[in-house]
Image: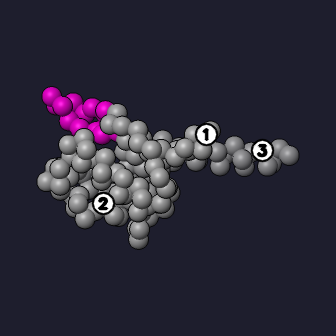
């Protein structure tokens, strides 16, 4: 799971989590917070690959064991022609891309609130 954010100091970062099975239970672990030079799909893909290699995810591990990718619905992240998930599919052919449910809920609530506010005003 990854998400990009920009701080109030205008620093772009990427937060990474990994979800694994451990002793028969599904566990989610914070993997890291990495600064981004650019928030483009190509730049995120390159820096993500470098980070994963640094923390021990070899090409063989990525190819054989990574089965899912979850992020917000931004085209930069999950776009079918040039998003980060599409670029990663070469190294991780088994995985499926997911739009984060928490993000979808947030978008739905925002739409509902905006609709109600428009009707009240």
Horizontal and vertical percent for residue 111? 65, 49
Q: Which mark is residue 88?
A: 2
Q: Which mark is residue 117?
A: 3
Instruction: State the residue at coordinates (30%, 56%).
Output: 96
Tags 2 and 3 touching, CB below 8 Å: no
Per the rendered image, the range of residues in magenta is 17-29
**Which tag, 2 or 3, sits closer to the chain's start?**
2
- The foreground one among 96 and 36 is 36
- The foreground one among 21 and 57 is 57
Q: Does the magenta run of residues contain 109?
A: no
**Image side of residue 50 versus residue 107, left or right:** left
Residue that mark 1 sits on: 9
SS at badge 1: loop
Instruction: State the residue at coordinates (26%, 56%).
Output: 95
Tags 1 and 2 touching, CB below 8 Å: no
Quadrant in the rendering for residue 10: top right
**Which tag, 1 or 3, sits closer to the chain's start?**
1
Residue 100, visible in the rendered structure = no
Magenta-colored segment: predominant secondary structure: strand
Position of the N terminus, as image quadrant, is top left
Q: Which mark is residue 113?
A: none
Q: Does the magenta run of residues contain 19?
A: yes
Tags 1 and 3 touching, CB below 8 Å: no
Marks 2 and 3 sit apart, C-alpha to C-alpha, by 41 Å
Residue 86, visible in the rendered structure = yes
Horizontal and vertical percent for residue 4? 48, 47
SS at badge 3: helix
Which one is in front in this view, the residue at disc 2 or the one at disc 3?
Answer: 2
């Amino acid at each position: 799971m990854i998400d990009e954010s920009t701080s109030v100091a205008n620093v772009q970062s990427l937060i990474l989590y990994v979800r694994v099975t451990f002793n028969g239970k599904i566990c989610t672990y914070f993997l890291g917070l990495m600064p981004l030079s650019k928030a483009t799909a190509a730049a995120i893909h390159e820096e993500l690959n470098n980070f994963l290699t640094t923390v021990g995810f070899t090409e063989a591990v990525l190819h054989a064991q990574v089965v899912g990718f979850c992020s917000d619905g931004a085209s930069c992240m999950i776009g079918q022609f040039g998003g980060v998930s599409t670029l990663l599919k070469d190294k991780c052919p088994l995985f499926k891309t997911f739009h984060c449910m928490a993000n979808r809920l947030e978008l739905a609530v925002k739409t509902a609130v905006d609709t109600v506010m428009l009707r009240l005003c």
